[in-house]
Amino acid sequence: MSENNPDLDGPPDGGDEETEVKPVVAVVGRPNVGKSSLVNRIIGRREAVVEDVPGVTRDRVAYDSEWQSQEFTLVDTGGWETGASGLAGSVAGQAEYAARAADAILFVVDATVGATDADEAVARVLHRSGKPVVLAANKVDGELQEPDALALWNLGIGEPFPISALHGRGTGDMLDAVTAVLPETPEGEGEDEDAPRRIALVGRPNVGKSSLLNRIAREDRVVVDTKAGTTRDAVDEVVELGGRPWTFIDTAGIRRRFRALQGADYYATVRTSQALDRAEVAVVLMDVSEPLAEQDIRVVEQVVEAGRALVLAFNKWDTLDDERRYYLEKEIDRQLSRVSWAPRVNISASTGRHVERLVPALETSLAGWDTRISTGRLNGWLKELVAATPPPVRGGKQPKILFATQADARPPQFVLFTTGFLEDNYRRFIERRLREDFGFHGSPIKLTMRIREKQGKGGGRKAARGSTRRDWRR
């Protein structure tokens, strides 16, 4: 392999010299969907062999590529022939290899054919890999073919980018999406599925985050002081809780007026935001000995906006008397009603009271965050829901929901394809029913719309044929 493909080799003789390692983008897809044509389009020259028969590319070939000053290595995969286990198995095997070796995946599908069994096999492998995937809906040579690309939402790996590798149409937007998910340095090996789940401890200053981490770790891992703002760095600690390891990220307290911060406090707030980006679930700690503050609500909102699973932890619960407990429950009902779906734990970081209850709460939130519903099951459920409770009339017309798909998980993201705008109340109704019927406990849900508007008078076949991607808007 190394004799024929020096691009995949390490340094040459005397290779103690340091070389720059670029992120790797693997181009995957079943035979004859236009992978090599797309590779040629990206690298700007005719290097990959292109022929209108399946299986021309037999080996994985690497090329140096660049887009908008972002350099990366593009790997064209091949050798996908029908074997003993069938084409779908062969394609999935190649996709699995690419997912292990690459930092990002460019998944190419023939939009004119639609999603085949082999495409669905690849999508399942790529989804399990956890690697970022950009879906290229190839052979969309004009606007009339763009609706074909929309059907590829059903693969469940995100938004399809309609492109034409032959003419270059749409490839710029696709490459923007690819470079946006590339790491600054390649990750090499994929993330270990058995690695401890990552938890950010967040909250306004001096609510007991460091005390809680020390209690969980059973030793003084981080500095604790009654003065607010002691913690300035995000500290990662792997600790065992409930018989399993977890990575806890103790963060500097989030302050309210971000732009007014200066010096160390400013950078502490920046690092807190970065800690949320690295976490999978956030434990928002609140001091119940004081009334819930605006800063507490803002912290919760920041976690929801970041799309992280959520657990609400109320600290110093053992200090409450009956009167304070009564008024606190009223505050929670009033100010935290938006996140009533989040598990709640009442604890004491100083004494360790009920700290062990964090484990089932964390597991519940992460399970909701990971949940994915198949397109068939989702649309069957939605059909019954809409039949029982149709969308409200708007502007004299009743919008219809044509179909829906779960575009992503972590957090769960749903796209509704409609003929008109759905009121906020109806979308909240759909979200509430999703939670009632499918769970999603402890996880935010992102619900967006794609509205198809018919152009011209009379609708009919002419309007339907003329419906293009520009007729769909969020």
Image (spheres, rainbow, N blue to C red):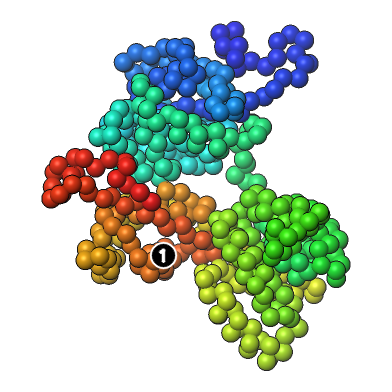
Secondary element under disc 1, as helix, strand or loop, is: helix
On the rendered structure, is 458 left or right of 71? left
What residue does disc 1 label?
431
Q: How many marks?
A: 1
Residue located 64% across and 15% down the image:
9
Q: x%, y% of residue 410? A: 52, 52
Quadrant of the rendered image containing residue 307: bottom right
Badge 1 amino acid:
Glu
Quick check: 147 above or below 413?
above
Towards the viewer: 396 or 59: 396
Quick check: 30 above or below 123?
above
Residue located 21% across and 47% down the image:
455
Camera sees residue 150:
yes
Mark 1, Cα crowd under 10 Å, few <14 / some 14-19 / many 20+, is some
Quick check: 235 above or below 97?
below
Residue located 15% across and 49% down the image:
457
Quadrant position of the N terminus in the picture: top right
Q: x%, y% of residue 248? A: 72, 56
Q: x%, y% of residue 229? A: 81, 63
Q: x%, y% of residue 57? A: 42, 16
Camera sees residue 249:
no
Residue located 40% across and 36% down the image:
161
**Residue furthest bottom as drawn:** 323
On the rendered structure, is 128 left or right of 298? left
Quick check: 164 above or below 236?
above
Quadrant of the rendered image containing residue 140: top left
